[in-house]
Amino acid sequence: CDIMELMSLTPDQINALFEFCGAVFILNHCRVLFKAKQVAGVSLLSTAFFFLWGVWNVFYYPHLDQWYSFYAGLCITAANTLWIVMLVHYSRKKRV
């Protein structure tokens, strides 16, 4: 990747890269949780906040005509949805 190419990215494309990378990192959380099968040191409240922020972004980006961010926002929101479902599942499993 050339530095001049990076400099030619629009703010929407740069934001989308951050959102998409966030989705990859969240999916890594899911992978680790699937392997460990137990939840420790994770706040469901914090995770829910960032999930709701993602839902808001999916609504908001089209109003800004930021379509790259919109599609990357769908990715991060889907990853957060999976993460929350897994957190709830493995948290309940631990109690039983």
Image (cartoon, rainbow, N blue to C red):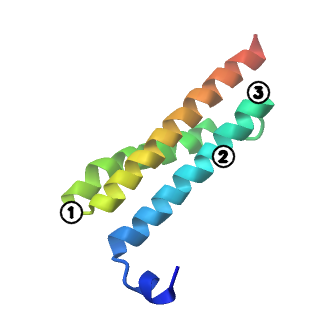
Q: Position of residue 94 (x, y in %)?
A: 77, 19
Residue 45 is tagged as: none
Label 3 sits on what residue type? Lys
Q: Position of residue 79 (x, y in %)?
A: 51, 41
Q: Quadrant of residue 31?
A: top right
Res. 39 in view? no
SS at mark 3? loop
Q: Residue at x 21, y 63 (%)?
A: 65
Return the disc, 2 or 1, that comes first in the chain's sequence: 2
> Number of numbered discs present?
3
Q: Position of residue 17 (x, y in %)?
A: 46, 65
Q: Quick check: 50 left or right of 13?
A: right
Q: Quadrant of the C terminus?
A: top right
Q: Is residue 93 above or below residue 9?
A: above
Residue denoted by label 2: 28
Residue at the far front: name it: 1
Label 1 sits on what residue type? Asp
Q: Quadrant of residue 9?
A: bottom left
Q: Which residue is nearer to you in this view: 46 or 57?
A: 57
Q: Quick check: 95 left or right of 5?
A: right
Circle 3/circle 2 CB separation < 8 Å: no
Q: Quick check: 85 left or right of 6?
A: right
Residue 37 is tagged as: 3
Residue denoted by label 1: 65
Circle 2/circle 1 CB separation < 8 Å: no
- Measured in 3D between alpha carbons, the distance from the residue under mark 2 to the one under mark 1, in whole angstroms, is 30 Å
Mark 1 nearby-residue class (10 Å; few <14, some 14–19, many ≥20):
few
Return the disc, 3 or 2, that comes first in the chain's sequence: 2
Return the disc, 1 or 3, that comes first in the chain's sequence: 3
